[in-house]
């Protein structure tokens, strides 16, 4: 039996690919390479280039292989772009997932893990979110992920789909063995950009907004190491395949928030030099603070993070950035 990874050549998908190798199951990667890279995966990977919106191509894959579960990573994920080009998000994230769910349904594949986001919670005054907190998306990216969460719930009720929703907080860092890492062409994420400045690939970094209602005026996020996130997928898959009637959402974060200034100060500490930092206006669509209450995944799936240290996250990301 095979596991299908849509978007498996991307940053998160490729780390999960390596983590799932230990299952000794057939792993299929389906990716349109819009933001992923074939060489983020080993030569031996079964790689199919295609778009999730192409139902015919996808159906061909389901007919050719005996798929028991899908991990759906493919999608668009840049908050600011979603504000300026919402149609891309409703198309890639919502419509294409609908296509995928229909292909799953017509091929009797009933198990799916979905890459969702902490930003479905939006700016909740509580700041530390648990899975029962209400949806309050503040940008089309978050809204598109929330809509897919509703799709999964409705397909579950109507057709018995089993699903695990993983709400990612801020994913960063790289595989400690450096088999893969983050290599997007036009990075928008804080740690990645900070390290591009550190390695001389960019001149400076801007802090987007210094007047937020936080101690130092900058936004707070819960940064999770990519390898711990990959382990959460392995645990989720095990749970999904070992139980009936699975309908769960889990937060993936550490429960510890860092402000933009704190992250940049940690980068400076790790690299041992000052970054060229300037202050800029707020970026549209950014919630003030997103911190995970991750007690549910720890309790239900026995998920034990190994890299929950912001310096370790930055160090592994730096090792990767130097290798690029
Ligand atoms: N950020 C920043 N400068 C940058 C990139 C990001 O100040 O060059 C801020 C951003 O406004 C947000 C936080 O860092 O408050 C995390 O943003 P990122 O894009 O890394 O992740 P997101 O939370 O949007 O998924």
Image (tube, grey):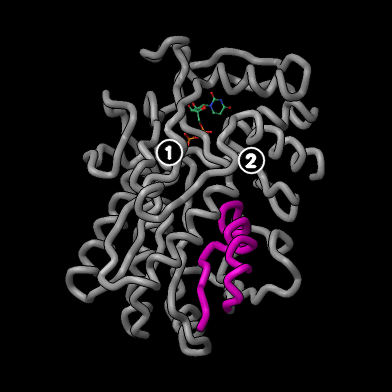
Q: Nearer the viewer, residue 122 or 90?
A: 122
Q: Mark 2 and mark 1 in contact (Cβ < 8 Å)?
A: no
Q: Nearer the viewer, residue 23 or 173?
A: 23
Point 77% across, 16% down: residue: 273
**Residue 47 numbered mark, or none:** none
User: Which stretch is magenta?
Assistant: 1-25
103 drawn magenta? no
Point out which mark residue 84 bears.
1
Above or below 196: residue 111: below
Q: Nearer the viewer, mark 1 or mark 2?
A: 2
Sequence-wise, the earlier of marks 1 and 2 is: 1
Magenta span includes 6: yes
In percent of width and height, residue 249 lies at 32, 53
Which residue does the numbered mark 2 point to in the structure image?
A: 173
Residue 192 appearing in the image: no
x and y, in percent, of residue 52 in the image? 47, 69
State the residue lying farthest toward the bottom: 64
Q: Secondary structure at mark 2?
A: loop
Give residue 66's position: percent from left, percent from top. Answer: 48, 86
In this view, the residue in front, 22 or 123, is 22
């Amino acid at each position: 039996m095979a596991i299908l990874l849509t978007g498996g050549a991307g940053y998160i998908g490729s780390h999960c690919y390596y983590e799932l190798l230990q299952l000794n199951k057939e792993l299929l990667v389906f990716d349109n390479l819009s933001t992923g890279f074939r060489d983020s995966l080993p030569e031996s990977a079964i790689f199919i280039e295609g778009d999730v919106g192409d139902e015919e191509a996808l159906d061909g894959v389901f007919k050719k292989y005996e798929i028991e579960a899908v991990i759906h990573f493919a999608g668009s994920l840049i908050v600011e772009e979603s504000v300026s080009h919402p149609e891309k998000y409703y198309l890639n994230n919502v419509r294409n997932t609908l296509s995928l769910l229909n292909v799953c349904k017509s091929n009797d594949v009933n198990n799916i893990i979905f890459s969702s986001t902490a930003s479905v919670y939006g700016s909740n005054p509580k700041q530390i979110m648990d899975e029962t907190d209400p949806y309050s998306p503040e940008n089309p990216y978050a809204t598109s992920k929330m809509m897919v969460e509703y799709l999964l719930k409705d397909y579950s009720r109507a057709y018995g789909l089993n699903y695990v929703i993983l709400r990612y907080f801020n994913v960063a860092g790289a595989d400690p063995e450096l088999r893969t890492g983050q290599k997007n062409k036009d990075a928008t994420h804080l740690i990645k950009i900070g390290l591009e400045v550190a390695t001389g690939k960019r001149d400076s970094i801007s802090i987007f907004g210094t007047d937020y209602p936080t101690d130092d005026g900058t936004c707070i996020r819960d940064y999770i190491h990519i390898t711990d996130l990959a382990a959460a997928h392995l645990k989720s898959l095990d749970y999904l395949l070992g139980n009936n009637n699975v309908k769960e959402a889990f937060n993936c974060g550490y429960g510890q928030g860092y402000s933009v200034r704190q992250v940049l100060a940690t980068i400076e500490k790790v690299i041992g030099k000052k970054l060229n930092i300037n202050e800029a206006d707020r970026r549209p669509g950014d919630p003030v603070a997103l911190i995970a209450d991750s007690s549910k995944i720890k309790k239900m799936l026995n998920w034990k993070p190994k890299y929950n240290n912001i310096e370790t996250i930055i160090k592994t990301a730096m090792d990767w950035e130097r290798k690029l």
